[in-house]
Amino acid sequence: MAQPKRHCATRALRALIAFASLLAALAAPRLAHAIGAAGDAAGQAFRVAQDHARAGRWDEAIATYRAMLATDPRNVDARAGLIDVLIWDRQFDAADRELDVGLTLAPKAPALLSRRARLLHLRGETARGRPYLTRAEELSPGDDELLLIGDRMWLGEARLRVRNDFFPKGWDDLPAAELSILQRAGRFVFGARTEHSRRFATAYGARAYNAFYAGSIAYSIAVGWVAGVEVGFGAPARAIPDALVRGSLYFPLVGRLDGYAAYSWFRYPNDIAVNMLNPVLGFQLTDQLRVDARYWIARVGAPGTETDLVHSYGGHVAYRPVRRLAFDAFYVYGAQLDRLPNTAQLGAIRSHIMTGAIDLLVVREFGLRPLYEFEIRKNPRGDVIHIHAVELAVYARW
C-alpha cells in the first residue's frame, strides 16, 4: 500500500510545479513590463534633472535628483549629477556630504571618486585629491572626463618663455626670455620667476640689458577665493621697474560669473612710480568658452611733477574645443606702463594690441604655447609704428 501513496504524491508535486510554471509564464510579461517601466521612469527623471541643470534651474535639478536617490540610494549617476549641480550652485559642503554617502555605498565608483578629487582641487587641496583621481583612472582607464580633471591637477610647473618683438626698419628688435616655476604645497602655491630682456632705456635711445627677479605666494582661502602677493626687483633695471609689489585676489560672484582684482606698485630707477589697479570680470559661458573684460587705471608720477591718471581697456576670450587644445584671443588698448622710464612717455604712448595664442598639452606632463602679437603704437609726436611679436613657451608639469 505504500507504493500507490508515493505515486500519488509524486503526481501531485508534478501538478503543482506545472501550475507554478504556468503562473510564472503568465506573470513574466507583466513583470518585465513593470521593471522596464521603472527603468524608463528613472531614465526620464534623470533626463529631466539634466535639462533643469543645463537651463540653470538648479533648485529644480537638485529636487529631481534627490527624489531619485530617495527611491534608489545606490544610483551613482543620480548622485554624481546632484554633486555637479551642488558644485555649480556653490554648495560645496552639501556636495561633500553627498560624496560621503555615495562613497560609502559605492566606494569604487569612478564618477564619485573623480568628483571627490575635483572638489578637493577646487578647495586648493590638489595633493589630497590626487589619490582619488588615481583610483578612478585605474577603475575606468581612458575616460575623457577623468583625463580632463587629471590634466588640471598638477602639483608643480616649470615654464620657459622666449619672445622677440620685431620693430620697423631702423629700430632694433627686442628679445626677451623668462623662466618661471610654481609648486603647490597644501593650499599654498609658491612661485619664482626671472625675466631677461634688451629694451630701450629712453624713447629713442639705445637698447639696454635688463634682468628682473620675483617671488610669489598664493593661498586658497575657500573655493574660488585665492589671494596672492608678488615681490620683485630689477638688477640691472635701466628700462624696467627696479622694484615691484603686487597683491591680487580671485573671487566668485554669482553662478558662472567671477572676478579678479590686483593692485600693483612699481618704481623705476629715476624715481618714477606707478600705482595701478586692475579689475577683471569673467564669465564662463560654457564648459568650453570663457570671456573676460579687463580694465586698468594707473597713477603715474615722479617727485616734484604732476601725476597723471592713465586708463587702459581690454578683453579676453578662451575656447577649449577638445581636452588638450585651447585658443586664446586678447585685445588691449592703452598705455605701455612698463616700457619707458619717462613720465610723459609712460602716460602718453598709446597702443592697440591684438594677441592670439594656442595652448597644446602634448601629454599631461608637457605642453607648448605659441603666441603671435600685433601692436599699433602711437607716441606723443603722432608717430605710428607697427610691431610684430612672436613667442613660444614650453612647460613641464608634475
Image: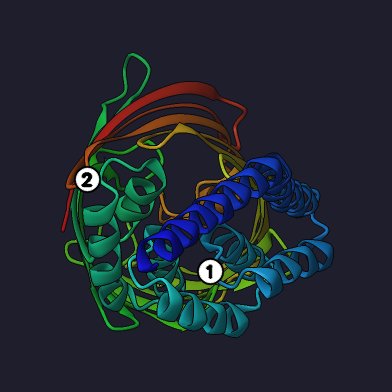
In-image side of 75 versus 208 (left or right): right
Spot occupied by residue 125 in the image (x, y as percentages of width and height): 35, 78
Q: Are marks 2 and 1 in contact (CB under 8 Å)?
A: no
Q: Quadrant of the C terminus?
A: bottom left
- The image position of residue 268, as x and y in percent, is 37, 66
The amino acid beneath tag 1 is Arg
What residue appears at the point 50 percent right and 82 percent down from the top-left corner? 101
| Residue count near mark 1 (Cα–Cα under 10 Å), binned few <14, some 14–19, many ≥20 | some
Residue 392 figure quarter:
top left
Q: Position of residue 293 (x, y in %)?
A: 68, 50
Disc 2 residue crowd, few under 14, some 14–19, many 20+, Cα 10 Å:
some
Residue 313 showing in the rendered view: no
Q: Residue at x 30, y 48 (%)?
A: 201
Query: Which residue corresponds to mark 2?
Result: 364
Residue 277's disc is: none
- Could you tell me how far apart the alpha carbons at marks 2 and 1 are, in whole angstroms? 33 Å
Q: Amino acid at mark 2?
A: Arg
Q: Return the x and y of residue 217 as percentages of the image width and height.
A: 32, 79
Going from the N terminus, do you reach mark 2 or mark 1 first? 1
In the image shown, does 124 or 344 lie closer to the viewer? 124
Rendering quarter of residue 62: bottom right
Give the secondary structure at mark 2.
loop
- Location of mark 1 (residue): 74
In the figure, 226 relative to 376: above or below? Answer: below
Q: Residue at x 56, y 46 (%)?
A: 18
